[in-house]
Image (cartoon, helix red, strand yellow):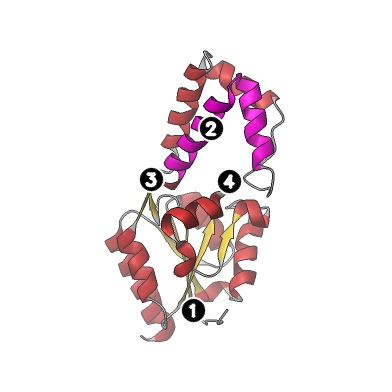
Amino acid sequence: MTRNKTWILFDIGGVLELVDDGPWQEELKNRWAARADLTRPEYDERLAAAGLPRIDIEQGRAAEYWDGFARTLGFTPAQQEVALAEMWDAYCGEANTALIDYARGLRGRAGVAILSNSADGAREEEERRHGFSAVFDPICYSHEIGANKPDPEAYTAALTAMGADPADVFFIDDRRQQIDGAARMGIRGIVHVDNATTIAAIEDFLTAATGS
């Protein structure tokens, strides 16, 4: 991988993917609770007591998680398959094509990378749907690095993968707590609201950093 002096670091959900990053999870939990003929509190209690693996910070345990999820809710194999498909459809949303194309155009001016909280299997699903590896390198997922944003370990892993100093990185995320976590590491950034505002902020950062 070519080492760059300046880096633009992107989150995925709510930034590179058009998805309401948060509400979809509650909508699915409510749907699955109803499917299992449980109230939402009963659903939450059962899942909390099931001791399922942390697939947001552990790799290679997705099958174990989803098998345990199905057993806990009394889902048939077919219902388990449907729930998994529903999860990935909601998780991945649609590609934010305009922002991805802009990131692609930054080549030669800056490195472009990803740091995303994730679930085991996200790399394969998002690559199949959106082809992120054709644009971004490195791509750092929480389930592979063992830490979620805003934990310092997540940002440290991304900095190491990029071979970058914090001052040379600009981070885009749709959640203030993740931007604040980056700031505590010395990484500047912006809370993503819309493409135009984010792109303008990136351009300001690059102008200040490189004069380009």
Name the secondary structure under disc 3. loop
Q: Residues within 10 Å of mark 4 (few under 14, many from 20)?
A: many
Q: Which residue lies under the disc numbered 2? A: 81
- Distance of label 4 from label 1 (alpha carbons): 28 Å
Q: Nearer the viewer, residue 85 or 164?
A: 85
Amino acid identity at mark 1: Thr
- Please name the residue that numbered disc 3 is placed on: 19
Distance of label 1 from label 2 (alpha carbons):
42 Å
Tag nearer the camera, 3 or 2:
2
Structural distance between the alpha carbons of marks 3 and 2: 22 Å
Label of residue 68 in the image: none
Q: Residues within 10 Å of mark 1 (few under 14, many from 20)?
A: many
- State the residue position of label 1: 6
Region of the chain picked out in magenta, as a range = 62-91
Point 58% across, 16% down: residue: 42
What amino acid type should be assigned to the residue bearing mark 3? Val
Of callouts 1 and 2, the N-terminal one? 1
Q: Residue tagged by mark 4?
A: 119
Q: How far apart are the two marked residues, 4 and 2, measured between alpha carbons?
A: 16 Å
Q: Quadrant of residue 200?
A: bottom left
Work out whether mark 4 precedes mark 3 in sequence or the reverse, and give the earlier one: 3
Residue drawn 38% across and 42% down? 20
Q: Check contact, mark 1 vs mark 3: CB within 8 A.
A: no
Is 87 in front, or is 18? 87
Query: Closer to the observer: label 1 or label 3?
Result: 3
Magenta stretch encompasses residue 83: yes
Q: Mark 3, residues whose alpha carbon is within 10 Å: few (<14), some, or many (≥20)?
A: many
> In the rendered image, which quarter contains the C terminus?
bottom left
The image quadrant that residue 21 belongs to is top left
Measure the alpha-carbon separation of dots 1 and 3: 28 Å
Answer above or below: position of 191 versus 8: above
